[in-house]
Amino acid sequence: MIMQDVKYLASSELFVRDQATGVLVEKSARFRGASLGLPDDLLHGGHCRVKTRRYLLDYAFDAPAGTITIRMDCAADRRGPAIAGALTLYLDGAAPPLSLSARLTSTMDYYTFKQPLPAGGTLTVGDRSYVFDPARDFAILDEHRSQFPYSTTWTWGTFAVHMGGGVVGSNFVERQELSDDDDESCNWVPGGVEPLAGVEFAFASDEPRSSAQVRDRDGRLDVTFTPAGRKAVKANLVAAGIDYWQLSGTYRGTVRSLAGECFAFDHVPGVLERMKARF
């Protein structure tokens, strides 16, 4: 569930993939650039809303209550049945947040905030409903603001899971503009968020749904991603453009804390994406 505004164009997308059947239902809306009005401060009462006659996605941040409420209501169309529902994300039981702000050059800077949060609620696609249990399910909140070169590329992935003692997961990126000091890559371990460096993605093939191995330089992240579904977005406005895909699937492998504790897991839901952008 995405809202993005990148100068020349703005858009919102959401997709739901049924793990049992493999059916993917996608909805999207496009807007004039710089028109979404995303707030400067999301976390302390921010409100994000995109709405057309047939598409609604709404985020409401309630800091005193410790919740984030997400509502969606998208009409049936040629791409698939209607999607509607509401999810509540809870700060109680969430992993520690990853927050990083970096001034890379006089014309390049970025800020990111990421946090896995327990998610509860119901999502309905057509005549089928999916119930989310905060004792089991996570949503990973990802806020990103950046000023990068005209042409930029990145590969990124993430996952999180409940394990003994707390939340275990990882956020990892390979991006040529970032140094070790500016890298947003990290592991989530119970009670902490710990930086990674030198992340590399090794894809098994050039196929659109290739599996991939992801490792960091120090051996604290060693996972294999197995894709199950794929979505892609392409937009070409001559001066600006996006060539983007995201794979949904599962991760297996290990995360190791700085203290040496090893967490092994299998079949953990997550995503992996690649972006090539001009803006």
Image: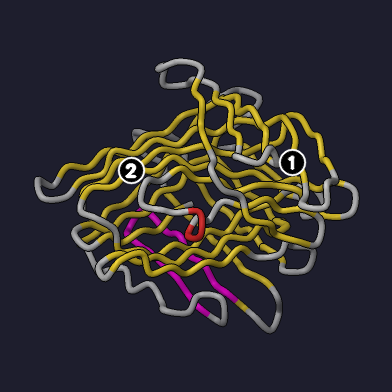
In the rendered structure, the answer to whether residue 227 lies left or right of residue 251 reads: left
Q: Secondary structure at mark 1?
A: strand
Q: Residue at x 56, y 67 (%)?
A: 99
Instruction: Judge whether 112 appears above or below 265 on screen.
Output: below
Instruction: Judge whether 65 appears above or below 26 on screen.
Output: below
- Nearest to N terminus: mark 2 or mark 1: 2
Percent across and percent down for residue 148 are 29, 58
The C terminus lies in quadrant: bottom left
Q: Are marks 2 and 1 in contact (CB under 8 Å)?
A: no
Percent across and percent down for residue 182 are 47, 60
The kind of residue tagged 1 is Val
Q: Secondary structure at mark 2?
A: strand
Q: CA distance from mark 2 to mark 1?
A: 26 Å
Percent across and percent down for residue 258 are 76, 52
Percent across and percent down for residue 164 are 90, 48
Instruction: Judge whether 49 appears above or below 127 on screen.
Output: below
Q: Which residues are magenta?
A: 46-61
The kind of residue tagged 2 is Thr
Residue toward you, 186 or 10: 186
Q: Residue at x 40, y 58 (%)?
A: 3
Instruction: Judge whether 194 appears above or below 123 on screen.
Output: below
Residue toward you, 156 or 182: 182
Quarter-of-image position of residue 276: top left
Which residue was labeled with disc 2? 153
Quarter-of-image position of residue 193: bottom right
Which residue was labeled with disc 1? 255
Residue toward you, 107 or 56: 107
Residue 249 is covered by the magenta coloring: no
| Main secondary structure of the magenta stretch | strand
